[in-house]
Image (cartoon, rainbow, N blue to C red):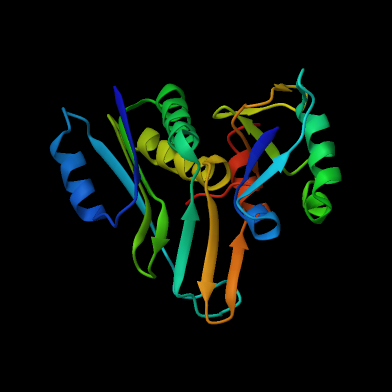
Amino acid sequence: MLELELCGKLADVGGAFVKTVIPAEGCSVAELFAMVARQHPALAPSLDASRIRACVNEAVVAPNARVMPGDEVALFPPVSGG
Amino acid sequence: MSAQVTLATEAFDPAELLGRFSRELEGEGAVVSFTGHARDRAKDGALVDALVLESYRGVTLASMEDIAADAMARFDVTRCRVVHRAGRIAPGEAIVFVATASAHRRSAFEAADYLMDRLKTEAVFWKREEGPLGRRWIEPRESDHEDARRWHP
């Protein structure tokens, strides 16, 4: 089980946190996106992997990075400061 | 050589920051500063009551520190100061302040320009305008990305 934090406008769609079941041995970030879309269909249209990035344990990671149950994961839509 | 970076959760005074930055000079001949303020109108002219900037744990500050470190490495500047607000910002309040110092002006101008271009597109914030008609998320415009790409030919 993973509790994902949804940042920015993603939270408007799915609330600030969503629980997602992932395999005990973990999965890749790309696989995680597919699982979130399957388990939370309302979020699926917002999960364009070319625009949404995963942050695992406070580091933005590539789609092939590994995610383990219990990791601190957040999904980042495009950022904008200034 | 130093970069000082702050994530501010309360309003700050850009004039006071610039004054302190200038008093700490050690012989540099040039200081450039930029302050971004929250506008009272959206791009389409709609009234804005507040700009809200969300951040994420330590990642937001780390992203700002990375950008400042890159500016220090890339340009011939001796120091830079970056302050960025998070939270709810009223129209007119400062959102972001950058200041750079160098022996001569060109490096200070370029480093400040670079800092702002990268903060606009890479600092980990999510920004929304709130007004009478509801809330609207603001993402970097294509022109912002074009500005940032100038530094990555």
Q: Give the quarter of the figure containing the N terminus of chain B.
A: top left
| Number of residue marks | 0
| Horizontal side of residue B106 vs B127, given as left or right | left
Give residue A54's quadrant in the image.
top right
Residue B85 on image: x %, y %: 38, 51
Residue A12 on image: x %, y %: 65, 60
**Which residue occupies the extreme left position in the image?**
B23
| B139 and B2: which is toward the camera | B139
Q: Residue at x 76, y 21 (%)?
A: A24
Give residue B138's quadrant in the image.
bottom right
Tell me: residue A77, above or below residue A56.
below
Q: Residue at x 26, y 54 (%)?
A: B12
Residue A47 on image: x %, y %: 78, 46
Tell me: residue B41, above or below residue B68.
below
| A60 and B33: which is toward the camera | A60
Residue B48 on image: x %, y %: 49, 75
Give residue B61's quadrant in the image.
top left
| A32 and B9: which is toward the camera | A32
Q: Residue at x 27, y 40 (%)?
A: B31
| Horizontal side of residue A32 vs A18, given as left or right | right
| Horizontal side of residue B16 vs B34, given as left or right | left
| Horizontal side of residue B130 vs A27, given as left or right | left
Q: Residue at x 50, y 34 (%)?
A: B59
| A29 and B84: which is toward the camera | A29
**Which residue occupies the extreme top position in the image?**
A25
Tell me: residue B52, above or below residue A22.
below
Q: Give the quarter of the figure containing the C terminus of chain B.
A: top right
